[in-house]
Image: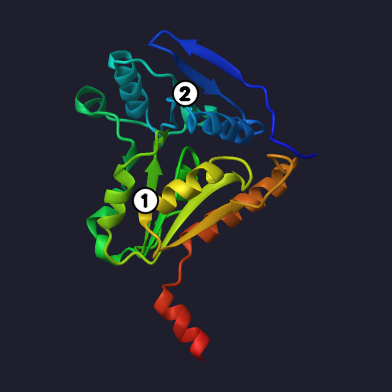
Amino acid sequence: MTGEPVAVAVAVTVAVGGTVAVGVGVFVTAVVAVAVLVGAGKTTTSLANCTTPAQYFHVLRRQAARRPRRPLVLMQPKSLLRLPAATSALEALATGRFQPVIDDPVASQQRDQVQRLVFCTGKIYYELLAAGEHPTNVALIRVEELAPWPREIGDLVDLYPNVEEVVWAQEEPKNMGAWTYVQPRLRASIGTVTTLRYIGRQERSSPAEGYKSSHDLEQARIVRDVLTYAPVSKKRAGAAR
């Protein structure tokens, strides 16, 4: 099958000024994401994929107060509704604000040790966290708003002085999800010197493996590849031998 992917999803319009909350399952999230992002790249549409209740709350507040109005599409995976890790303190709801990009709360305390920056969006962030304590040379950064592309990303990358590689991680196939939209924008944000790499499923005609066992194996491979990084200096030393 060729051509652009087509999917059907349930969309619920929220009465806060043109907001559409898209609740999608694993079988259609990939194609819905790429279809929405293609449209957002050509219009004034905003698209967010919030990972905490506070972020969801504040993006809706921003939308209600925004003038002039612009459409807002929210990608909300159902699994985060029952995930204990995806919670927010009352203080974050009362005094916080929407953050288009969220830095790694641990790695940001020792930025000089970080050599790989991993950008991701949505629930894969929690799967990376669930793998256990990640190496000190890897930082996990959440892109909460994909469109318009956050200007804060370039400033955030500059805060890490020893970065050798930037990664975009996603669980969707390479020709689906956000990668084709993200790639040129992330490259512009990090410059032409730093290596930019994709980690996720390879290109496919279907957004899912079809078997849970196959899905779990591939998901474990993605998590392992994201969190395993050998510094460039060690790679060169090994090649010299």
Q: Which mark is residue 179?
A: none
Which amino acid type is shown beneath numbered disc 2?
Val
- Please tell me whether residue 197 is drawn above or below residue 170 in the rendered image: below
Relative image position of residue 114 (x, y in whole percent): 32, 63
Element assignment for label 2: strand
Residue occupying the point 52% across, 42% down:
181
Q: Which mark is residue 73?
A: 2
| Residue 237 left/right relative to 113 | right
Q: How many marks?
A: 2
| Residue 217 left/right relative to 231 | right
Most distant residue in the left direction: 95
Relative image position of residue 195 (x, y in whole percent): 44, 64
Residue 58 visible to the viewer: yes
Residue occupying the point 34% across, 18% down:
63
Residue occupying the point 53% across, 41% down:
178
Residue 129 visible to the viewer: no
Can you identify the residue that label 1 sits on?
189
Relative image position of residue 87 (x, y in whole percent): 36, 31
| Residue 56 left/right relative to 219 | left
- Please tell me whether residue 204 is drawn above or below residue 221 in the rendered image: above
Q: Quadrant of residue 113?
A: bottom left
- Please tell me whether residue 22 is drawn above or below residue 122 in the rendered image: above
Front residue of this view, candidates 20 and 103: 20
Residue occupying the point 26% across, 60% down:
111
Mark 1 nearby-residue class (10 Å; few <14, some 14–19, many ≥20): some
Distance (Cα) linking label 1 and label 2: 23 Å
Mark 2 nearby-residue class (10 Å; few <14, some 14–19, many ≥20): many
Q: Name the mark nearer the viewer: 1 or 2.
A: 1
